[in-house]
Structure formats: C-alpha cells, structure tokens
Image (cartoon, helix red, strand yellow):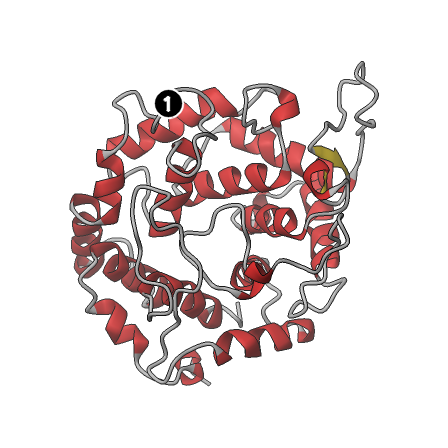
Amino acid sequence: MPWIDQLNGDSVTWLLEHPSPDVRYRALRDLLNLSADDPRLVEARQAAAASGPIADLLGAMHPDGYWERPGPGYGPKYRSSVWSLITLAQLGATIDMDQRIAAACAYHLEQAFLPGGQVSYNGAPSGTFDCLQGNMIGSLMALGVNDPRLWAAYEWMARTVTGEGMSPNTDKRAPLRYYAYKCGPLFACGANYGQPCGWGAVKVMLAFSRLPAAERSPLVERAVQAGVDFLFSVDLLAAAYPVGDGKKPSGNWWKFGFPVFYITDLLQAAEALVGLGYGGDPRMSGLLDFIRSKQDTEGRWLLEYHYNGKTWLEFGRKGQPNPWVTLRALKVLKELKR
C-alpha cells in the first residue's frame, strides 16, 4: 500500500505549494526523496536559505555565532542559542546552506560540549540533563555537523542510560559519575524527583536515531535497546511514564506542536521509534492510529502547541492546519516500513 493511502487528502501538494520556502524544501527532500543534485531540490534549498524562517532566524544571530547572549546558550528561554539551533534543525537547515549556521554550530560546540561528553547548560559537567543532551546532539546531527565532540557526547549519553562505569552522584571523586539533574541510569532526572523522565527518554532516543546503525558502538547499541524497552514499557498512547510528584502525565503529550523544545509530544516519540526502525512493531499500532486520527479531512494536522510570543518566530495559529506539524506527521507515516 502506498504510504499516501493513509491520508484523508492531498496534503503533500498543499506543502509543495506552500508560500514558506522551508516547507517546500522539506516536502521535496523528506517526502519526495529527490536526489541532492535534482534541480528542483537545489532551487528549493537555495530559496529556503535566502528567505523565510531560516533566513529570519539567522538575521537575529550575533556575528560571533550566538543568539541573545554569549555562553552555552540555554538562557534566556526561548530565544538563546539552544532554542534557535533546535528550531533551525527542525526547519530543515544544514550547515552548507549558510556559513552562519556552521558558525553557530561551531560556537555551541565550543561553549556547551565538554571533554567528558556532557552537553551543559552552564559550562560545567554538572549542568547536563537528558533533554538538553538529546536535543543538542540530535539537532547538530540534523544540521550536518561532523565533529569528534559529537561522538564523545553520544558515548557519554549511552553510558548514562545503561549505567556502565558510572558512579553515584554522591561520589565526587569518581571520574565518571551522575549529577544532580542527570542523577541515574535509564533517564533518571533530578527535575522529575529522581524518576525516569519520558520526555528526556524521547530526546535521547531521537538523537540515537540520527546516528547511522553502522556507526553505533556496542555501548550505544545497548543504550538504544534499553531506551526502546523503556519507551515500550507502558502503552505509548497512555504515556504513563513515571512522574515524581505523583500527578498524571502532562497533557502536552497529546498536543502536536512546532517547534518542539524540551516539552515532548507523542508525535516526537513516534519520530524517535520509527527512526530507530520500530515503525512496524505491533506495540506502535495504537499510537500510529492516534496520529492518523488527528488529521483533518484534507490530510493536514493542526497546531496544538506553540511558542508564539516567546521565541523569535511564529509558526501559525493554534487550532489551524499547520504545515510544519503536517510535515512531522507525514514523515513518520512515510517511513513506517523502513
């Protein structure tokens, strides 16, 4: 069955004819699979770099390669470097589009990626936590970065998932140990009262999905398996992962948005698992049916969560058909059989 048979309408044509150049580029690249030298893709790529959200976001960047203030770039939310790089990656930008993207990635690697492999919000090893680690590794990979510090960050991230060679956060003399936020194996997080964090797990697994299988070390493979087992340990559609304060899972799990920062939705969980090759797993069926059910009569998905007024750009109105959310959903449905 062609993957487009899952759709209620021709949303692919809607995306290909969309006025935003990054949407057209992503549709050609991710849905039609044009070769890199196809004239249509080359033209769309040039247009995406020259105008629209990618160009606007780069226009807000400091010439030294950061947004808002120098340093690791976590604050202020959601306009500093961390959030801007995540947005660029989700828009489909790459370092060969514009030298400013390469400069921003190089700056962030210098400021936030530490020799031990930690991605830090404050420049110290203790400033590491799963959602930041996964978000930034995955974003730089999507942006086309190839740097040894990324491989060190993957190894650190894998080790924190499996617990191999790690000491408790109380053992401050140990060369490899947990910290206050990244406080234990299997996505344990101090911000979640020491319980495994489902949001952090999705970010980590999405980052692992962007590392080609042939390049994964045995340690990374073990971490991937542990993460997959964790995500499948509950009904995906229920998202009943541990919540340290005893409350119900966040309602944001069921709201599809753009961009996606540290809050996670079920569509991103599907992106991670499908990217790791689990699209055909029977345990995915409920979640995939849920994703399909959220399309409108024309095969488009609505914007249900946004950061309008909080970050540099706005990506549509809440409750309206949204091209960026639709791109996210269509890519998942297209790659189910991968």
Q: Residue at x 39, y 70 (%)?
A: 302
The residue closer to the viewer here, 283 or 147, is: 283
Tell me which residue sits at (28%, 38%) in the image. Answer: 96
Q: Quadrant of residue 15?
A: bottom left
Of residue 251 and residue 185, the one placed in the foreground of this image is: 251
Relative horizontal placement of residue 228, taking residue 55 as reference (left or right): right
Where is residue 291 drawn, in percent x and y? 51, 73
Residue picked out by circle 1? 69
* Residue 117 shows in the view: no
Outermost residue to the top: 173
Disc 1 marks a residue whose amino acid type is Arg
Q: In this rendered view, identify the residue nearer to me: 237 or 154.
A: 237
Classify residue 331 by image quadrant: bottom left
Q: Is residue 103 visible?
A: yes
Total marks placed: 1
- Which residue is at 32% across, 37% downward? 95
Q: Secondary structure at mark 1?
A: loop
Name the residue: 35% across, 42% down: 311
| Nearer-the-camera pick, 244 or 258 | 244
288 left or right of 48 in image: right
The location of residue 40, given as percent across then percent down, is 18, 60
Q: In this rendering, is residue 140 above or below 298?
A: above
Q: Position of residue 241 (x, y in %)?
A: 72, 57
